[in-house]
Amino acid sequence: MDRLTRFVDFIRTCPRAGAPLIDGFRDHCESGSDVRRCGECLADLCGPPSADAGESRSSGESFALAAMVPGQRARIERVPVRPGAPARLADMGVAPGAVLEVERTGPGGDPLYVLVNGYHLSIRRGEAKDILLRAL
């Protein structure tokens, strides 16, 4: 019972879990939704499925910044082209060819705190899902 209590405390405070995970589980319990739909939910939040943090990606595979977890590094391949966004992101060093490392995430997984060209930045998941990377 002590271990279960510690696990619940961990889920409440972990930046990769937190309130969204707990709310999702509550909704699942109340609605009886099918867990096989979890992939759809994750794709909506984070973009296409990606390799787990413990697995390595091939150098030819592109993936969204939103799919990365703390400690992962990758090279920026494409930054979204939107009015105002490209210049702002480029000014922060987020540009094709730059190496990016995810340092940590905020509560509930948003924002992502990254290191790019020696600068510590925070990027919202909404922006991060449009930034494409390639494994180093």
Image (spheres, rainbow, N blue to C red):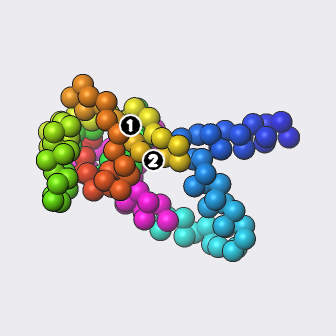
Q: CA distance from mark 1 to mark 2?
A: 9 Å
Residue range in magenta is: 41-62
How far across and down, in percent of the image, does residue 95 sit? 16, 42
Q: Residue at x 44, y 35 (%)?
A: 104
Relative to 36, 72 lies left or right: left
Decide if residue 15 is in sight here. Answer: yes
Q: Residues within 10 Å of mark 1 (few under 14, many from 20)?
A: some
| Image: 97 above or below 62 | above
**Which residue type carries mark 2?**
Asp
In the rendered structure, are the residues bearing label 1 and label 2 in contact, judged by CB atoms less than 8 Å apart?
no
Name which quarter of the figure residue 129 lies in: bottom left
Name which quarter of the figure residue 101 lies in: top left
How far across and down, in percent of the image, does residue 50 sit? 39, 52
Q: Nearer the viewer, residue 35 or 81?
A: 81
**Which residue type carries mark 1?**
Tyr
Determine if the magenta segment contains residue 46.
yes
Residue on which the image places disc 2: 110
Q: Residues within 10 Å of mark 2 (few under 14, many from 20)?
A: some
Q: Residue at x 38, y 52 (%)?
A: 125
The secondary structure that dominates the magenta segment is: loop
Q: Residue at x 27, y 35 (%)?
A: 100
Determine if the magenta segment contains residue 19.
no
Decide if residue 78 is in sight here. Answer: no
Q: Residue furthest front?
A: 84
Q: Quadrant of the C terminus?
A: top left
How far across and down, in percent of the image, does residue 109 sit? 48, 46
Q: Quadrant of the N terminus?
A: top right
Residue on which the image places disc 1: 113
Number of numbered labels in the structure image: 2
Relative to 126, 88 lies left or right: left
